[in-house]
Image (cartoon, grey):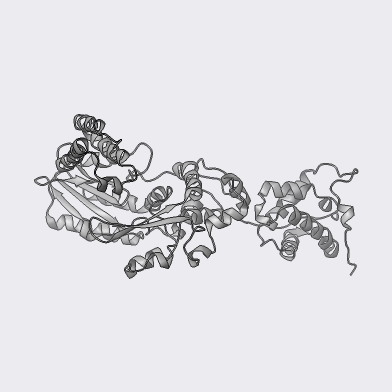
Amino acid sequence: MTEWTFDADDLDEDEEDADPPPGPAELRLARALALAFLGTDGRRRAMIEAALATLHVPDEARARAWIGALVALVRRTFDPLRRASLDELTTTIAHGRALARRDRGVHVVRWVATPGEMRAPRWDVPRIDTVGDLARWLDVEIGELDWLADRRAMLVRARVGPLHHYVRTWVPKPSGGARLIEAPKARLAAIQRRVLREVLERVPMHDVAHGFRRGRSVATFVAPHVGRAVVVRVDLEDFFASVTRGRVIGIFRSAGYPEEIARTLAALCTTRTPASEMRGIEHAVRARLRVPHLPQGAPTSPALASLAAFRLDARIEGLARAVGARCTRYADDVALSFERDRSHGAIDRVIARIAEIAREEGFGVASHKTRVMRRGARQSLAGVVVNERPAVAREEYERLRAILHRAATRGPSPDELGAHRDLRAHLAGRIAWIAQWSERRGAKLAAMLARIDWSA
């Protein structure tokens, strides 16, 4: 068998006698080869074998020579290969002198399905075919993208330090125990906000979901339950940490993204908690946090958690319709309400069924937080009393009023200043929350805030 080679000088792309622009046949071959190359790990031999599996070649020895020259061109142009987008790679191959010197009769016999092709998207999300496309869309280098995504879990095994992407803080829960806040640092947070704004906000949630979505709020969450005979509140346990990376990959796949893009996006939006950050934490919590999960504190987590709960929402809504109830969900709070009173047994069966559905959909219920609130007692959802009209509990108003009065007469206390990075903004936020339900009370509190001397 004759061994064919091409001299590198024969393939100089800058020669004056350059080949004419590629025609339809060359573009078809180039597209097929680009897909084949993107399906490899970027090694020379693997790329050549992928090309030979894609094409019919009359003479394999000659084909190995011109394909080898083409692979050399691609590897010089794109290092690593996954920097390349499908279109860029196709153009480079189509204009390669090596492709122009192929034998007559070379044609495509197999189109390779690779991560280089995005399915037709169901929603108006950016088209991203390759990891190279993703890096360009996020305006990062491919190496930085690998570091931010930490696909190989290098950081979870490294000592916690500046290279880690999250600042982790354990915050005591009012009901006991502690909640882990995993806040991304500025670079990753900016990327997550872009993913949220340009991808996740364009993927529809179930109509039952009211948290963290445009046009919905706590007000829309509680409105269907105002003035009802029975209100039931069920708390989903460890809502964010229950959503694993595999489920997040599924969300991005449903948006049309190819496997590798979905995996990389999911890696950017999930994290594993290092063992050193979980000393003294109970085993069940450690087990949940050591696998890749949604971090509570990331901009993308609320939307991803709600999208992951789509089937949960649909099934609970179906249950609510079946028992004559109304149903809404705000993050980890599920609320059902009944127009007429129901027996304890009937309510208990509904709650048990909700817990069963939650388990089947990969979530858990914090049973000790479940509340059944009848008309004769206070009915409260997300801090809002819903017995007759939505309102903040009077004691919350009086507590804030006392804080403002003390600060206005004696100045802000050192303890309160130390407890909040910006006490004035914190108080303004609490006032805005109350004003949402009572303009009169909000105006009174705002006037008190204005009288505080912050210069001392």
Residue 432, position in %: x, y? 27, 35
Q: Residue furthest left?
A: 376
Q: Is residue 306 above or below residue 284?
A: above
Where does the image place residue 452, in percent across and percent down from the top left?
A: 25, 34
Instruction: Give the x, y percent position of residue 315.
Output: 32, 53
Residue 176 left/right relative to 31: left
Q: Residue at x 70, y 47 (%)?
A: 88
- Can residue 111 be seen here? The reply is no
Total tally of numbered discs in the picture: 0
| Side (left or right) of 81 relative to 405 | right
Which quarter of the rendering shows the C terminus?
top left
Residue 255 in picture, x, y percent from top left:
50, 48
Is 134 above or below relative to 407?
below
Give the residue at the far front of this rendering.
456
| Quarter of the image where the N terminus is located | bottom right
| Picture quadrant where residue 207 is located | top left
Q: Nearer the viewer, residue 446 or 389?
A: 446
Is residue 140 visible from the viewing direction of this image?
yes
Depth check, front residue: 28 or 71:
71
In this rendering, is residue 355 above or below 207? below
